[in-house]
């Protein structure tokens, strides 16, 4: 057999094995619902932003990523993050989200990136704020419920070290139990935990309160994803 063909077969087999291994640690009944990277620029078509002009396909070490590079011209109904890129047309209840994130802003206490989930509308959702330093308004799991965000985590760390590199991030959400667990680099020990049952199925999004950053290799597992209309009315 030609050596190049053999190597190709081995590579395909390893990809399949990695998929099986990744699936094996998920709850029974979960399936891979979303698998997105940004090597194909058409990937942007699957997202809706609070302000599309603040987002672009960026380059990082020869790989394409989703990049938040500016401030969004968006004023939320209640105090909450402004920079959001939403996975459009699908709602998720219980899920496991895994992705790579890189912060590209300056270092300060509230230097952050955020993940949004179980989003009902622009004034009702959860979000995770991962910041350099924890305080009453940073580095916590927040509830936005027709009022300015409120911290709901029962346990957090003192903050995360964004540095200049990429980080693996995971959220595990179980709507029946109300549990929310957030992981940063260490996929076994959560950095934040909360229990809350305000919201069930909703949209998932990515972004920042008022910083910049890059996002790549988005994977979402769950029992199902429900088809839905656009989160924001089309402009």
Image: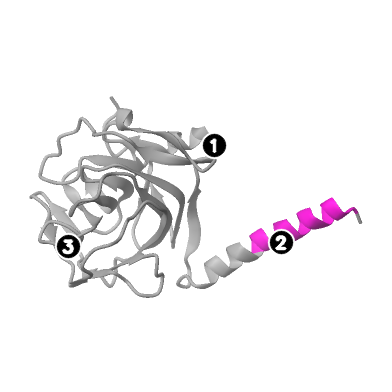
The total of numbered circles placed on residues is 3
Helix, strand or loop under label 3? loop
Cβ–Cβ below 8 Å for labels 2 and 3?
Answer: no
Coordinates of residue 64 in the picture (x, y in percent): 50, 39
Coordinates of residue 153 in the picture (x, y in percent): 18, 67
- The residue furthest left is 147
First along the sequence among labels 2 and 3: 2
Residue 13, label in figure: 2
| 87 is higher (above) or lower (below) than 56 | below
User: Viewed as shown, does residue 146 lie left or right of 118?
Assistant: left
Cβ–Cβ below 8 Å for labels 2 and 1?
Answer: no
- Asked which quadrant contains residue 93, the reply is bottom left
User: Viewed as shown, does residue 218 lie left or right of 203?
Assistant: right
Residue 135, label in figure: none
Q: Residue at x 10, y 45 (%)?
A: 79
Label 3: which residue?
A: 134
Question: Which is in the foreground here, disc 2 or disc 3?
Answer: 3
* Label 2: few (<14), some (14–19) or many (≥20) C-alpha neighbours in 10 Å: few
Which quadrant does the C terminus fall into? Answer: top left
Coordinates of residue 57 in the picture (x, y in percent): 44, 34
| 24 is higher (above) or lower (below) than 141 | below
Instruction: Look at the image and say whether residue 105 sits in the magenta stretch.
Output: no
Helix, strand or loop: magenta stretch: helix
Q: Which residues are magenta?
A: 2-16
Label 1: which residue?
A: 40
């Amino acid at each position: 057999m030609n050596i190049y063909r053999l190597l190709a077969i081995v590579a395909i087999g390893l990809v399949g094995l990695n998929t099986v291994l990744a699936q094996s640690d998920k709850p029974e009944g979960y399936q891979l619902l979303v698998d997105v990277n940004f090597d194909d620029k058409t990937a942007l078509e699957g997202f809706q932003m609070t302000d599309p002009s603040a987002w672009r396909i960026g380059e990082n070490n020869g790989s394409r990523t989703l990049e938040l590079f500016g401030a969004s011209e968006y004023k939320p109904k209640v105090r909450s993050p402004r920079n959001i890129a939403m996975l459009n047309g699908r709602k998720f209840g219980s899920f496991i989200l895994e992705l790579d994130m890189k912060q590209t802003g300056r270092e300060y206490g509230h230097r952050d990136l955020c993940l949004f989930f179980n989003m009902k509308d622009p004034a009702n959702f959860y979000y995770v704020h991962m910041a350099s330093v924890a305080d009453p308004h940073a580095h916590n799991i927040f509830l936005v419920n027709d009022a300015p965000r409120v911290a709901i985590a029962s346990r957090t760390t003192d903050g995360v070290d964004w540095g200049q590199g990429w980080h693996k991030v995971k959220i595990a959400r179980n709507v029946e139990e109300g549990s929310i667990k957030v992981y940063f680099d260490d996929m076994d020990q959560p950095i934040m935990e909360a229990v809350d049952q305000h919201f069930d199925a909703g949209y998932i999004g990515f972004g920042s309160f008022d910083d910049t950053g890059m996002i790549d290799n988005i994977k979402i597992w769950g029992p199902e994803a429900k088809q839905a209309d656009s989160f924001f009315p089309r402009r």
